Image (cartoon, coloured by chain):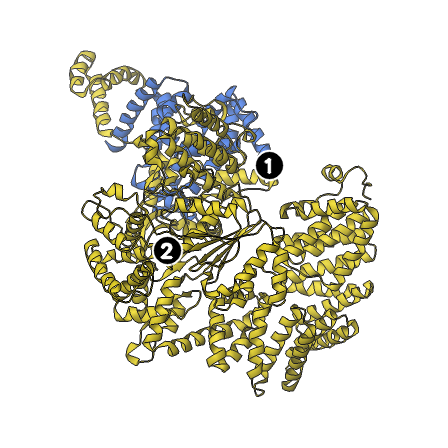
Chain colours: A yellow, B blue
Amino acid sequence: MSDDWQKIKPIFDAATEIPADRRREFLERACADDPSLRSEVEKLLASFEKAEDFLENPAVGEVASLIIQPVRAAEKDQKFGFYQIVSPIGRGGMGEVYLARDLRLRRPVALKFLPAELVTDPTRLGRFQREARTASALNHPNVITIYEIGQFEDRHFIAAEFVEGRTLRERISAGDLKMPEILDIATQIATGLAAAHRAGIVHRDIKPENIMIRPDRLVKILDFGLAKPTEKDASADSQSLRHTLTNPGSVIGTVNYMSPEQAGGENIDLQTDLWSLGVCLFEMISGRIPFSGKTINHTLVAIMEKEPLPLEMSGSPALQEMEAVISKLLAKPTENRYQTAGELLADLRRIEKRLPHEADDVETVIIAKPQSTGENVLLPTGPTAETPEVPHNLQPSQTPLIGREKEIVRIAQLIRESRLVTLKGIGGTGKTRLARETARRMLGDFPDGVFFIPLADIKNPELVVLEIARPFKLPETGAEALAKTLREFFQNKKLLLVIDNFEQVAGAAPVLSDLLSRAPELKILVTSRLLLKLERERDFSVPPLELPDPQGSQSPEELLEYASIRLFTERARAVRGDFRLNGENAHRVAEICSDLEGLPLAIELAAARIRILSPEQIARRLENRLKILTGGGRDRPARQQTMRGALEWSYDLLDEAEKNLFRRLSVFAGGFDLEAAETVCASGKSPKDQLSETDILDAFTSLLENSLIAPTEFAGEEPRFRLLEVVREFALELLAESGDSEEIRKGHAAFFLSLAETAEPEILGPKGREWLDRLEEEYENIRAVMSWADRFDRDTLVRMAAATRDFWTIRNHLTEGHDWMEKALQTASEDSPEILYKISVGLGHTAKHQGDFDAARRALQKALEVSRKIGHQKQIAVSYRGLSMTAKGQGDYAGARDYAEKALEISRQMNDPLGIAISVNTLGDLARIEGDFSKARPFHEEALRICRELNNKQGVNCSLNNLGAVAFAEGDFARAGEFYSQALKAGRESGEKSTLSYSLDGLAALALQGGDPRRAARLAGAAEHLRKSLGFKMEKAEQIFRENYLERLSSELDEATLGKWLERGENLKTGEIFALALEDRNSPLLSEESGSSAAPPD
Amino acid sequence: MENEKKDARQITALLHEWKKGKKDAFDQLFPFVYHELRRRASAYLRNERRGHTLQTTALVNEAYLKLVDKDEIEWEDRNHFFAIAAQAMRRILVDHARTKKRKKRGGENEDLPLEEARFVSATEKSVDLVALDDALNELAQFDRRQAQVVELKYFGGMTVDETAEVLGISNVTVRRDWNMAKAWLHGRLKG
């Protein structure tokens, strides 16, 4: 055979290289004298022709595709919980992806199923879900939003925002990208990456396929679910390498966008994403990739070793700068690259300003982009790396803001020029959205944060101070004292408060001017229907959205330049995916928007109806409705009239069940979930108005679709909804007219009473935090129930107060809680000692925390008396402990000890570990206050042991600190250091900040002891700063401890030096505090910073 | 971590030795590569989604990065490594096919992990890998290079260019070898 084969070979080769129809002729010549050779070759040629793609797909690839095939794909219309499959999309990372419809929220979603194999491995499933959750926490406009990580039967899925548009790959292939747009896309990707990197997430697979560009040019980075959290631990290098390599998908697909460190299998961090972005940018500009080779290996080598292909950019300085940016992105050593996405952003923005404004810039005046308005204000589209760690509580929006660029720029200017700006306008003009968006973009201006204070549900001006203090979790000591605390708190802070819906509490305007006068760096942005009429107030009347000329004959494309038309179109498409503005309907849409005077809410209400009505029908009906209105009494301003008209119109289109539900939902303050709606809104006064669960679900979805209910950004498990303020007012009026008001209020009260009573026994248990969060979420509703019950249903008030007693104290709503409980106690009957006890103890705790010890003692003695009467041992112990702490607060240490010993005795008899721990801890504290440390030690040791067993983190940290203090006092400094460091580390892990400051004080005292007064001063400064920022008041024993070491410190350093180092400590960031506190005291860094005078530590 | 580093050094040294012609270096090397690839292939097959072709070269490249000491390795070593890897892939796939066949005949009840069982059931549907393996051995008797081309290209998942580089021959030669071997194997298996 071997010989024959060698003969066959050249003939076969030659034959395959000529066209099939000439092969016969060729063989006749080539094998003229050898028929057997000819037959061999012919046989082989026949096989060759038949073989086609035989073996052409690599063995593994073929195997893989065959294996994956049988995995169940989802069918059209199949339902997974609330999601119904529409069609496969087939793009995205791991798992199958479908376009589906969220039946509850009536919005399209991208549903990504995890492969069954992943699901069978709990460790990996867990990892995947954790990561997806991390990614879902991102909430950035340039990162695809993950709605839910869910499971239906055995299918695990991720529901994400469905992004319509084209991938960057498609755009590059189309070859129509121009410079301004390229810059914009790169900027948006960098903005998204900056947010992700800040959250410790590296994408690792940035490539044109993973970038979506929506028609409105908003860019979204996809597939963050596959991104891995940054590996920060240097010792985990090899671990992370293995992780990378074993992670399916890490090398799969194209290698073109890989960074050198990825190609080399090295540790990967955020610079990898910047490299990949550099490759994308290169490709967007040149249509080519910077590194390529014949084979994958050549490409990898090129990436690791070669210079990128030249970009050949010429012309303007902006383009040259762009080239410099790209080469910095594509620097091989990571240290030569941009260190953060924020640095890159700064450069990109600079280039943008220098871009020549050529003709094609016109089409690049981008909807969602403030930069393109060209003013001198630099407003990032989102929190960027330039605004690192700016604290804020701005919720991300569910839908993009449309238009409003000029307004945002103008408002930002006003805020920069003045200190109090009021956005004025009737309900429905979009003041809130505008305020929120402006605030978000100004994060960079306010290093101390931007905070949103919603007042929609507040009617009582006295509560305004409490509401302003809420996001800061300041200690409450009564409204007046709180106002003072607030002034101090804001004093040196560069901070923006966004106070929403001020009109109802106009009486509280002086509170704002008082704050402004005491805190020179504070700025306030208010939204209100009325002006505040304060001295330095600057106002901005929020205009309606831009409208086209109703007589004009613009094309649909031209009409889309108007924000009002864009808003209508976007909202219409949200309910009917196939809605497009075209030659036929554009004119009608323009008419509708004009009729509605460009009022955003009115336009939304109208657009929502596009599901069943044509634009023409909407226009006609609206016109009729508005005519009736304008024909009627003109006691309202015209625009308000229009808004009202749009609401009535939308309401009239509802069926009876929907109308019923809509009216009834107005009873909720601050939002509701579906369950609450179902329970509270089921029955009105008349039995025929009874709504079944199905009725409610149907009506609910319809109201959602028609924009009468809005989903809120939910933090918890259940989606929440609310009525916008104007809508709620309208609905409340209707509810009052319907006569159902009383029934519904009763139902509302009963529902939240039941919630509070269910939560009550759980609050101090292992799930306490979840329940407290749940109550916090319903804070407005609880408040509404309380104030209703105060007038109409005393029994509910009493039970509600009893059930929520711990909530007020633990969540620091002291003033309000105290007021409610006091009111409740006045009517509580002596016949129900249980309730009496609960309210008294709650009252005692709030009073004690507010520093009103006399009131606290009275309340707690009442609690003790009642619980003794019923002989409830645990309650007796709780009362004693409260009395003990109150006595301690008043300086009556003997009394405090007496009470604590009584409590301890009962807790021991009952074998109540937490009770024992709290009692011995108090006894330990008392011993320390009196300087008896050897007596204190066994108490704290016992507390530590019990808290560890109970896994009570705060208790453990607290005990560790206390033992540190004991060891310090006994001169065992090494041991003290151990305790404090342990406490500090544990505090860092559990996020339990309250005990951290004590650990820092301890370490400060140790630093002083070790001969390093400057370090001591810095730690002392940091401790004090931490307490201030938490509004944390020191315990007596700790106060003594601190005073002692500070006194020694001031004898070692002169006043100026001490002040300087204290201040340095105060300015440390949290991360730096830990680094300083935990670093090796022999480290060179430290001794250098501490100055030469420091004696070497022992 | 220490072990990995040691392994990497050893593997790199073995590659050098094999390059110098030391036959048993290959035998020592093979198990490392085989083991590593098998693990990776299983991982991939468990996770790959439909329609996304798995790239064997990417797989092999990962194994390479994992196994060798990057400071010591030379460019030619990479080609040697890839040649071994293709052989290893061949053995992995064929072994699985064989195990599956045995099972079908009611042979010993091996406790295969789920993903490997699926791995095999799928191969059966496409190409009879056991028969292909035998035929390829036969081909190697009279044209060793053609058999190698098939091994690199089909089992190693390499492109013509990559195959050419590993074997140190021209692209044209690779294509010719491939055409003829494919024709012959097709005749053998399907003819």
Crowd tier of the residue under label 1, counting other residues whose Cα lies within 10 Å: few below 14, some 14–19, many 20 or above? few
Residue A9: image x %, image y %? 28, 17
| The quarter of the displayed image where residue A28 is located | top left
> Tag 2: residue type?
Thr
Name which residue lies at 29% across and 51% down: A568
Closer to the camera in the image, A456 or A822: A456
Amino acid type assigned to the residue bearing label 1 in the image: Asn
The residue indicated by pointer 1 is: B3
> Percent from the top left, x then y, of residue B182?
29, 27
Q: Is residue A446 left or right of residue A59?
A: right
The chain holding disc 1 is B
Residue A278 found in image quarter: top left
Q: Is residue A258 visible?
A: no
Q: In the image shown, does A874 or B72 lie closer to the viewer? A: A874
Left or right: where A919 falls relative to A646: right
Identify whether B80 is placed above or below A766: above
Q: How far apart are marks 1 and 2 (CA)?
A: 67 Å
Q: What is the chain identity of the residue bearing mark 2? A: A
Mark 2, residue position = A429
Residue furthest bottom as drawn: A831
Indicate the quadrant containing the C terminus of chain A: top left, top right, bottom left or bottom right: top right
Q: Quadrant of the N terminus of chain A?
A: top left
Is A371 in front, or is A274?
A: A371
